[in-house]
Image (spheres, rainbow, N blue to C red):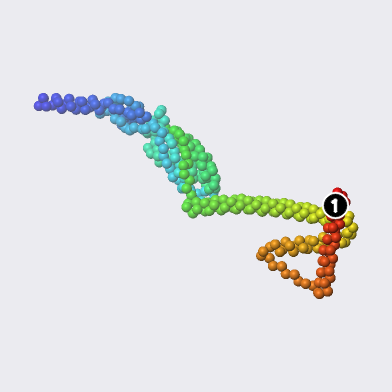
Amino acid sequence: MNYLFIPIVIFFGLIILISAFFIVKQQTAAVIERFGRFQSIRHSGLQLKIPLVDRIAGKLSLKIQQLDVIVETKTLDDVFVRLKVSVQYKVIRDKVYDAFYKLDYPHDQITSYVFDVVRAEVPKMKLDDVFVKKDDIAIAVKSELNDAMLDYGYDIIKTLVTDIDPDAQVKAAMNRINASEREKIAAQYEGDAARILIVEKAKAEAESKRLQGQGIADQRREIARGLEESVEVLNRVGINSQEASALIVVTQHYDTLQSLGEETNSNLILLPNAPQAGSNMLNEMVASFTASNQIGEAMKEAKKKEK
């Protein structure tokens, strides 16, 4: 029996001895209690406790943690909106005792403060202002949480409003308003462009008409100058102005008939006047041709004399 008892004692002794050692991970704090009373706080590394007397009451992470809180509230213009607030916090290294013993459910405590602040700030703003001033909401939440959680050993690193989600009908209405506004702006730009095109086209037409009128005026001026020179030439050979004008008219008349006759697809109809008038017209045309011949002969003789 003695031989059997000794190995058993040694075995349990080793187990108790081994249980006296424990390891605490990096960025972790272990709370040690002795007979149910706080004894000490152990940090990372290999640690030693009294077996059967001391026990590890719990461990707290010293890393930065994040808690996402979704809050539904109403804005100043009576629009219900859901906000997602992300709270980044950590346990203060020197206040592990307060974080472990003073606060049982830190997540619930933080959530309650987020609800309180958001539902106090958002109802003061219109929906558009909530999107614009979301950083102000986050700062207000962080300020309130810091004041409240510091006594419990928690440090609020940062708070972020990561999502703003109005009702689906409200979002659809906002999209329609935005689309209508953009269509209005597009219509204004299109109207301005059309107006510019009309103005520029009118300017171009006006310039074209001006140049066309100037061309016609120049053409008529040159025609008048040519007629004037022709009359002067005829006057020099003894034909008065009236006869010269009649000759020029007849010449232009036959030039017109010749131009019309050159067109293959044109039809020319000459309507005669009264017989007497027609006879007079024929006599005048014959006289005009006779005068033309005389003028031609006179001009030839004049050129010979000049030579």
Is disc 1 placed on a helix, strand or loop? helix
Residue located 88% across and 59% down the image: 239
Please provide percent x and percent y for residue 249.
81, 62
Residue located 88% across and 61% down the image: 242
Looking at the image, residue 166 sits to the left or right of residue 9; the answer is right
Looking at the image, residue 34 sits to the left or right of residue 3; the answer is right
Residue located 79% across and 72% down the image: 273
How packed mark 1 is, by other alpha carbons closer than 10 Å (few <14, some 14-19, many 20 or more), is few
The residue wearing badge 1 is: 303
In this view of the protein, which residue sits in the foreground, 291 or 128? 291
Q: Quadrant of residue 283?
A: bottom right
Looking at the image, residue 232 sits to the left or right of residue 106; the answer is right
Q: What residue type is labelled 1?
A: Lys
Residue located 47% across and 38% down the image: 159
Please provide percent x and percent y for residue 168.
47, 52
In this view of the protein, which residue sits in the foreground, 166 or 254? 254
240 relative to 100, above or below: below
Note whether residue 38 is visible: no
Please provide percent x and percent y for residue 101.
37, 33
In this view of the protein, which residue sits in the foreground, 306 or 50? 306
Please provide percent x and percent y for residue 288.
83, 64
Looking at the image, residue 136 sits to the left or right of residue 302; the answer is left
Note whether residue 261 is visible: yes
